Amino acid sequence: MKEHLKHPIFSIISDIVSTENLESYVIGGFVRDIFLKRESKDIDVVVIGSGIELAQKVAAKAGNPKVSIFKNFGTAMLKFKDLEIEFVGARKESYNRNSRKPIVENGSLEDDQKRRDFTINALALSLHKDNFGELLDPFGGIDDLNNKIIKTPMDPMITFSDDPLRMMRAIRFATQLNFKISDVTFEAIKENKERIHIISKERIIEELNKIVMSKKPSIGFKLLDESGLLQIIFPEFHKLKGRETRNGISHKDNFYHTLEVLDQLVPHSDNLWLRWSALLHDIAKPNTKKFIKGIGWTFHAHNFVGEKMVPRIFKNMKLPLNEKMKFVQKMVLLHMRPIVLAQEEVTDSAVRRLLFDAGDDIDELMKLCEADITSKNEEKVKRFLDNFQLVRRKLKEVEEKDAVRNFQPPIDGQEIIDTFNLSPCKTIGDIKLAIKDAILDGVIPNEREAAYQFMIEKGKELGLTPVINKKNK
Ligand code: CTP
């Protein structure tokens, strides 16, 4: 494995530990990623002894980068070139059952490997010159990598109970790597699911977002559901599950539909917030569901109700309550518009209105809507996608012609007041709206002069007389 330890940092560490005759290893994710052929910039180094002392000695030989010391945890971190290296003394850990804070005791390499989360994360490569690059794998991590298995080195009941975040990590790794969680390990997740409550929401969302950003997020959400964790960490999403049948008519299972939408979106977008929009686009379907005789299942206004649900969900899950959330709200609100448009005749006016409402987010909205087509009927899918092509073409044409994407009314309220010598009143808003509608409906072009004439006409209709002022002379 020597060829994977060519970075100068490894020879610096190797010189020190060999001179001082210390046992030291590179361990964890970096070693796993060598075998997975993934590049990793985070290195964990374990030493039988003091991690902090070793970090200080390495820093002295590596041009004195700043060493950050975490005394409580007995760890130290430094940055060297493009890498971030964390040093820790090998530990045998027993945990305080009500928090994740470990009670640390010094231990051997194997003690340290055993206390790690998964066998694939417990691989170590020696840094001592006597056996530089030798792999130490007492828990069968390489076999599990080859067989694509996520499994804990010791009894999973202890591993998860010690640190319940590892339940999320198991599902996250299974999703990212497309590995299977061993049956015994998965059973232990089910049994320990309630312990997820001691983990902060910030840590949970970090893992959940990694699932959302993976190549096939549905794997993770199905595992979260099966383990019982989903109901605890994201109850609104869990509520999408199930189909109901009345008078022989069933609606689709919105849980599986949503996951299909998200999976379909993945190749088209790396935008985390668009992926969240996919997750939440039908979130209000359970709350708005009704069976109407002669019509069937309806989810009336689920986009409006969904938009209103987003802030509470974001707050509960400690997602950001800023413009990212607003973007998700907008996508949830508008997610049916392009579909409706594609079903009807694609008129310039409807396209202009869509452009006006979506603004710069129109491209993201179109991606979401295309992913939202999950019918099994190929004929139907093709028809929709063809119509979407037409909508996209029209969007382009209308945008080039009328520039309504970032529509700013060419006449503002003040000008209406000045023109007709009005005191603040509802009429001003009515005229403004009439101008906007006339532009969006294509009655007049999106230009000042045309809008000005339209305003004068509209005013006259309302019994107003224009007064001469500086602006319209
Ligand atoms: N680890 C653990 N339990 C945790 C977190 C981490 O046992 N809850 C151990 C694992 O051995 C892991 C190593 O610490 O490989 C480093 O953890 P981290 O940097 O969080 O994750 P990586 O495994 O490197 O994976 P990724 O970079 O994808 O998060």
Image (cartoon, rainbow, N blue to C red):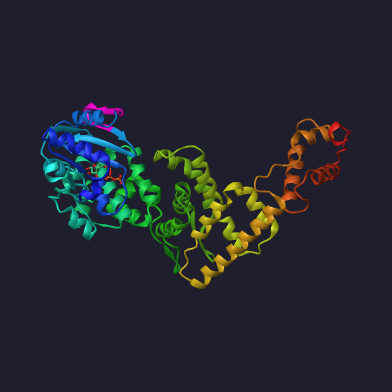
Q: On the rendered structure, is 288 left or right of 415?
A: left
Image: 19 above or below 250: above
Image: 233 above or below 96: below
| Residue 399 visible from this viewpoint | yes
**Part of the protein shown in magenta:** 64-77
Decide which of 244, 6 is in the foreground and name it: 6
Check the image and name the residue furthest to the bottom. 379
Q: Position of residue 33 (x, y in %)?
A: 27, 50
Decide which of 219, 187 is in the foreground and name it: 219
Q: Position of residue 249 (x, y in %)?
A: 46, 67
Decide which of 188, 289 is in the foreground and name it: 188
Q: Residue at x 36, y 47 (%)?
A: 210
Q: Position of residue 145 (x, y in %)?
A: 22, 56
Q: On the rendering, which quadrant does ligand 1 occupy?
A: top left
Q: On the rendered structure, is 451 left or right of 236?
A: right
Q: Quadrant of the C terminus?
A: top right
Magenta-colored stretch includes residue 284: no
Q: On the rendered structure, is 134 left or right of 404?
A: left
Q: Residue at x 75, y 36 (%)?
A: 413
Q: On the rendered structure, is 7 left or right of 137?
A: right
| Residue 95 visible from this viewpoint | no
Counting every numbered tag in the picture gives 0
User: Residue 226 occupies which quadrant of the picture?
Assistant: bottom left
Q: Position of residue 330 (x, y in %)?
A: 54, 46
